[in-house]
Image (cartoon, rainbow, N blue to C red):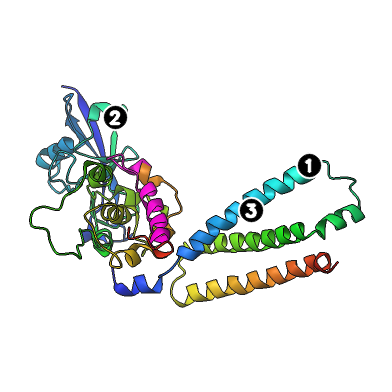
Amino acid sequence: MRQGVIEENAGGMWLWLLQRLTAVVLIVGLAVHIVATHVLNLGELSYDNVAGRLAMPLFVVVDFALLGAGIFHALNGLRMVLLDYGFSGRSKTMLSWGLFVFGVAAFGYGAWALWPWLTA
Amino acid sequence: MPEATFRIKRHNPEKLDDQNGTGDDRYDDFTVPYESSLTVLEGLFYIQENLDGSLSFRYCCRAAVCGSCAMYINGTYRLACQTNVRHLDDGPITVEPMPHMPVVKDLVCDMTDFFAKYETVMPHIIRNSAPPEKEIIQSPEDRKKLDMPVDCILCGSCYSSCPSVWGEGNYLGPAALLKAYRFEVDSRDEARKERLPRFDNERGSYRCHTITNCVEACPKELNPTEAIQWLKGAAVRRRLLGRAK
C-alpha cells in the first residue's frame, strides 16, 4: 500500500479513546438521571423545585459534561459512519471541520440554555 | 454410483467486451460421481479433468494449511480442500468465488490489494538489539499468546466478508491487522515506532466497527475482531502510558 495513505490517515487514537470515555459519561449520566427522576422521590415536580436543583453546582457540572459528551459522541459516531462512504483527502478534512464547527455551535446553544442556572 | 451436482459460478475475462460486459457470468451445473470421502476440491479436479478443462480455481496443499482454495461454498466461506461433500446439505453444491473481491477467472480472486495490505503491517519480527549467540528464548507462556494468530493461513475469507473493506478500499482489513497483532504480541519482537503507525490510523485498526463478520467467516475459527480491539488498546498503552509493548 502506498505510504501516503498511512500519513493521510494518521491519528484516530484520541477520537477512539474519547468516544469510549464519553460513552461511559453518557451511560453513567443517563443512569443517574433515570434513577434520580423516576425512582428517587426528589420532592414536588414544580418549576421552583426543578430550578433550584438545576442551579446546584453538582448539577451544573453534570449538565455541562452530559452536553459535551453527548455532542461529541453523536458527531464523532456520525463521522465514523460517514467515513465509510468514501471521504478521503480534502473531502475528509472538510467533513471533520464541518462537524467540529457544528459541534461547537451546538455546545454554544446548549450552554446558552444552561446559562441562567449557572448565574442564578 | 451416487452422484453430486456442482453448480459453479463462471466468469470469463476474455468475454468482458461482449454485449453485456459481464464476462459471460453464469452458473454451470456439473455431475460428479460421489464417494463418501469426496471433498469439494476433488470434485473440482474431476470437473477440470473430465468435464470442462477451462474451469479455473486455486489450490496447493490440499490439507487446509496454504489458504489457496478459500471459496464461497453453499453461501459460506470454506476451504474447498477441507470441505467434505457429505457434510453439506442435500441438493446442488453452489461454488462461487469469494464475494466482494475482483474475480480474475471463475473461482480465482485477485488478491493483489490483500497482499499489499499484508505487507504494509511489516509481517515479520523486528529486532533492534544485537542478535543473541544462540536462539531468541521465548517462554511457554509467551508462546501461548501466539497460538491463535499463527494459525492464520491468509486465505482472505475475513477480508472478503468485512463490510468496512467493501466500503473503504484503503482499509487494511482483518487479515493484515490480525498479522500485526501476531507480531505485536510476540515477546521476541522489538518494534517500537516501526509498525505502530502502520496499523494505528484511521485506515487501520480504527476502521474496524466490530461487525465480527470476519470471526464468522474464518475457516480456521480465529478471532480477528478481538485482535483488532487489542491493537486499539495497545496504541493507548504505548502512546499515552509509555509502555514498550
Where, by quadrant of the figure, is residue B208 drawn? bottom left
Q: Residue furthest front?
A: B133
Q: How busy is the neighbourhood of tag 1: few (under 14 within 10 Å), some, or many (20 plus)? A: few
Q: Look at the picture and state if B95 lies above or below B101.
A: above
**Mark 1 or mark 2: which is in front?**
1
Residues under numbered marks 1 and 3 in contact, where contact means CB atoms less than 8 Å apart = no
x and y, in percent, of residue A60 in the image: 75, 61
Q: Is residue B181 left or right of residue B60?
A: right
Q: How busy is the neighbourhood of tag 3: few (under 14 within 10 Å), some, or many (20 plus)? A: some
Q: Look at the picture and state if B152 lies above or below B240.
A: above
Q: Which mark is residue A38?
A: 1
Residue to which mark 2 is pinned:
B88
x and y, in percent, of residue A73 in the image: 59, 59
Q: Mark 2 falls on what kind of element?
A: loop
Residue B230 highlighted magenta (yes or no): yes
Q: Mark 1 falls on what kind of element?
A: helix
User: Of the residues shown, which amino acid type is indicated by label 1?
Assistant: His
In space, the residues marked 1 and 2 are separated at their CA atoms by 54 Å
Query: Which residue does the image show at 83% across and 41% down from the upper left?
Result: A41
> Which of the pair A75/A57 is nearer the observer?
A57
**Residue B99 seen in render:** no
Instruction: Read off the chain for label 1.
Output: A
Q: Which residues are magenta?
A: B216-238
User: Of the residues shown, which amino acid type is indicated by label 2?
Assistant: Leu
Q: Look at the picture and state if A64 lies above or below B69.
A: below
Q: Is residue A93 left or right of residue B234?
A: right
Residue to which mark 3 is pinned:
A26
Instruction: Read off the chain for label 2.
Output: B
Residue B109 highlighted magenta (yes or no): no
